[in-house]
Amino acid sequence: MKIKGKVCVVTGAASGIGAEIAKRYVEEGARVVIADLKEDAASEKARELTAMGPGEAIGIAMDVTSEDAVNSGIAKVVETWGRVDVLVSNAGIQIVHKIEDYPYADWKKMLAIHLDGAFLTTKACVPHMKKQGGGAIIYMGSVHSHEASQLKSAYVTAKHGLLGLARVVAKEGGQHGIRSNVICPGFVRTPLVDKQIPEQAATLGISEEEVVKKVMLGDTVDGEFTTVQDVAEVALFLAGFETNALTGQSIIVSHGWFMN
């Protein structure tokens, strides 16, 4: 149990991939912060995970696009548990449009949540990690950190940007024992993806079945979705890996959709 007792902040953790990562961390004895825009959902998830044990969890409200909210949230974590060992920057949404139809407000919203959120949470956690002599920062990228798909200009741009941020954090953090890596999942069957299926079918003029088989899973080796459990296992591995031998990297979890 390499992360037993470690303090792990997971953003967007009240549901989906973030919730599964938080669950996996608690199973390994970590102290986990469920940081989510929805405070009630975060608190409920924290109670559920604490009851499960052997670790424990707390829920806090955090709008990752607000510097004040992020700083306040991380300050509360340090006040409660004294340190921050792991940051998983996971909060994200999806909005799809053709480029010529993409509302600028939606473009800015996408980049704010995915990129500004990653930057602000990193900025808030790094001083504590430096003070305590190290830590792990994990960004939730995507195969779209390396690839592109139709209708996803803002998402692809943001996910590509996370690679650059992670590499700079790895360079700056190395001498302080701070590691930075990006998990790049393929399509994970979450409510976020379920919402995209009819949207893409309508926009592309194809059936929902074709969206799944051809657009989402057509380039995998087995036609299978990546699972939240798959992603959580990689997040556990990166949180527990304690040297600079693995930093500044992207770990692709995609059933072979994209291969480095």
Image (tube, rainbow, N blue to C red):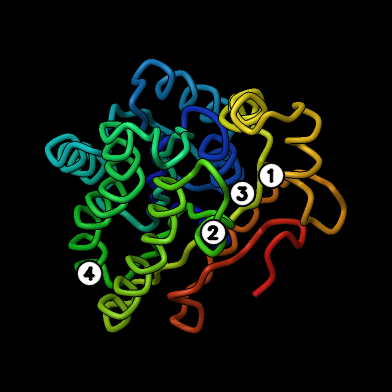
Instruction: Determine the CA span between mark 4 and mark 3.
Output: 26 Å
Query: Where is residue 222 shown, x and y percent of the image?
Result: 87, 53
Asked whether the beta carbons under mark 4 and mark 3 sit within 8 Å of each other, the answer is no
Say which label, 4 or 3, has the lower sequence index. 4
Instruction: Determine the CA span between mark 1 and mark 3.
Output: 5 Å
Residue occupying image coordinates x 76% and y 36% = 212
Asked whether the beta carbons under mark 1 and mark 3 sit within 8 Å of each other, the answer is yes
Inspect the image, locate mark 3, and give the three-letter code of the amino acid beneath it: Ala
Query: Where is residue 97 shown, x and y percent of the image?
Result: 46, 34
Which mark is in front, 2 or 1? Answer: 2
Inspect the image, locate mark 1, and give the three-letter code of the amino acid beneath it: Gln
Which mark is in front, 4 or 3? Answer: 3
Q: Is residue 116 left or right of residue 1?
A: left
Instruction: Determine the CA span between mark 4 and mark 2.
Output: 23 Å
Q: Residues within 10 Å of mark 3 (few under 14, many from 20)?
A: many
Q: Is residue 254 left or right of residue 1?
A: right
Inspect the image, locate mark 4, and give the three-letter code of the amino acid beneath it: Lys
**SS of the residue at dot 2?**
strand
Q: Residue furthest right?
A: 222
Q: Which residue is mark 4?
A: 130
Q: Which residue is mark 3?
A: 232
Q: Residues within 10 Å of mark 2 (few under 14, many from 20)?
A: many
Q: Nearer the viewer, residue 44 or 251?
A: 251
Residue occupying image coordinates x 36% and y 65% = 135
Q: Is residue 251 left or right of residue 171?
A: right
In which image quadrant can residue 32 be found? top left
**SS of the residue at dot 1?**
helix
User: Height in image: 4 above or below 213?
Assistant: below
Say which label, 4 or 2, has the lower sequence index. 4
Which mark is in front, 2 or 3? Answer: 2
Which mark is in front, 1 or 4? Answer: 1
